Amino acid sequence: MSAELKTITVIGAGGKMGMRISANFQKSHYQVFYCENSPQAQQQVSAQGRELSSADSVVPLSDVVILAVPDIVLGQVSEAIVPMMKPGAILLTLDPAAAYAGLIAIKEGIEYAVAHPCHPSVFLQRYTKEEHADAFGGVAAPQHVAASFEHGDEKQKAALGKVISCMYGPVEQVHWVTVKQLAYLEPTLVETVACMVGAFMKEALDETVKHCGVPKEAAEAMLYGHIQIALAVAFRATNPFSDACMIAMEYGREKIIKPDWKVIYQQKELDTVIARMLKIDQLKR
Ligand SMILES: NC(=O)c1ccc[n+]([C@@H]2O[C@H](COP(=O)([O-])OP(=O)(O)OC[C@H]3O[C@@H](n4cnc5c(N)ncnc54)[C@H](O)[C@@H]3O)[C@@H](O)[C@H]2O)c1
């Protein structure tokens, strides 16, 4: 089995992630084929000067096949794509949910990988306008990636790391974890907790304006600055929270957080949230 990965197919090349990763591949030395089945999304691919291919003509040639399609159709799309893949090729998905749920079609001789962008850190030192504008990553601001490749060899893993670093670039580091660990990172850590808290802070901002008549600009200024300092103190211990702040924080925890919140780390809870996200009754694994 060759560890060199030269030929890549992107399935779903006209979707949100497909367009992002294709833009980076287009500037690379890889030979990349772009497949997309929605006419509107096909136009987006063509508008960027990328030629469309049919999956059945390019998948059998590819060292890596990337499924950039919605998670709820990954099982069905993989059933069509995996049988066409050549021995030793890698099927790469961009989110762990379907792989964790056992929905991805399995074929002897095919390797399986998942790679999810971490997005640029809130603590990243940004120097240029382009870095400041790149909230998502993949354009100018460096980010890390969390990825899994549990059964391939080390040479293949190194070559896959280069593909992943290209498609999500600029990338500082690829962190290799298991599919299950990746599922605990996303959804559990970053969606169930971090995105929920982010949306909750927006709800609290709106409630503050509505409930007490504080001017919106004042509430925004106060909150945005305090989000910055709260993260710096909690994660970087730049200086301690004040004694009074810690009392208010304890009160908030009592009123808002359930004492048993760590149940979200139980496997049956992870299974429940992933089944909900994939709109299935239960996982296949
Ligand atoms: N959107 C994000 O912010 C984000 C971030 C990280 C990871 N992801 C992951 O990336 C993957 C894709 O998500 P997305 O948000 O880009 O989806 P999307 O809905 O924006 O795009 C999916 C594209 O796939 C196309 N498609 C569907 N079935 C196809 C098929 N059989 N052949 C060819 N094309 C097909 C659709 O027409 C569409 O253009 C998912 O696994 C998602 O979890 C998304």
Image (cartoon, helix red, strand yellow):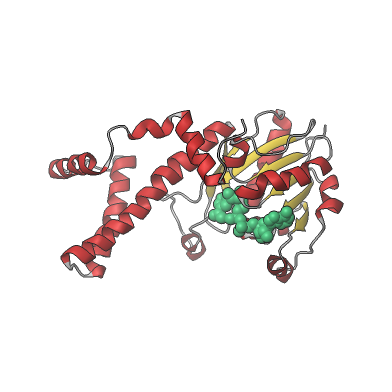
**Residue plotted at (70% across, 29% down):** 154
Q: Position of residue 196 (x, y in %)?
A: 38, 49
In the image, residue 230 sits, relative to residue 136, either above or below, namely above
Q: Does residue 8 appear left or right of residue 191 in this picture?
A: right
Q: Position of residue 95 (x, y in %)?
A: 59, 44
Q: Is residue 28 visible?
A: no
In the image, residue 13 sits, relative to residue 149, either above or below, namely below
Q: Nearer the viewer, residue 127 or 162?
A: 162
Q: Nearer the viewer, residue 137 or 206?
A: 206
Quadrant in which the C terminus is drawn: top right
Q: Position of residue 31 (x, y in %)?
A: 80, 53
Q: Does residue 255 appear left or right of residue 282 in this picture?
A: left
Q: Does residue 132 appear left or right of residue 234 in this picture?
A: right
In the image, residue 262 sits, relative to residue 139, either above or below, namely above
Count of numbered labels shown in the rendering: 0
Q: Nearer the viewer, residue 163 or 271?
A: 271
In the image, farthest residue toward the left: 244
Ligand 1 shows up in the quarter that is bottom right
Q: Position of residue 277 (x, y in %)?
A: 52, 46
In the image, farthest residue toward the front: 281
**Residue plotted at (71% across, 30% down):** 152
Q: Nearer the viewer, residue 159 or 77?
A: 77
Q: Quadrant of residue 172?
A: top right
Q: Is residue 65 visible?
A: yes
In the image, residue 85 sits, relative to residue 203, either above or below, namely above
Quadrant in which the N terminus is drawn: top right
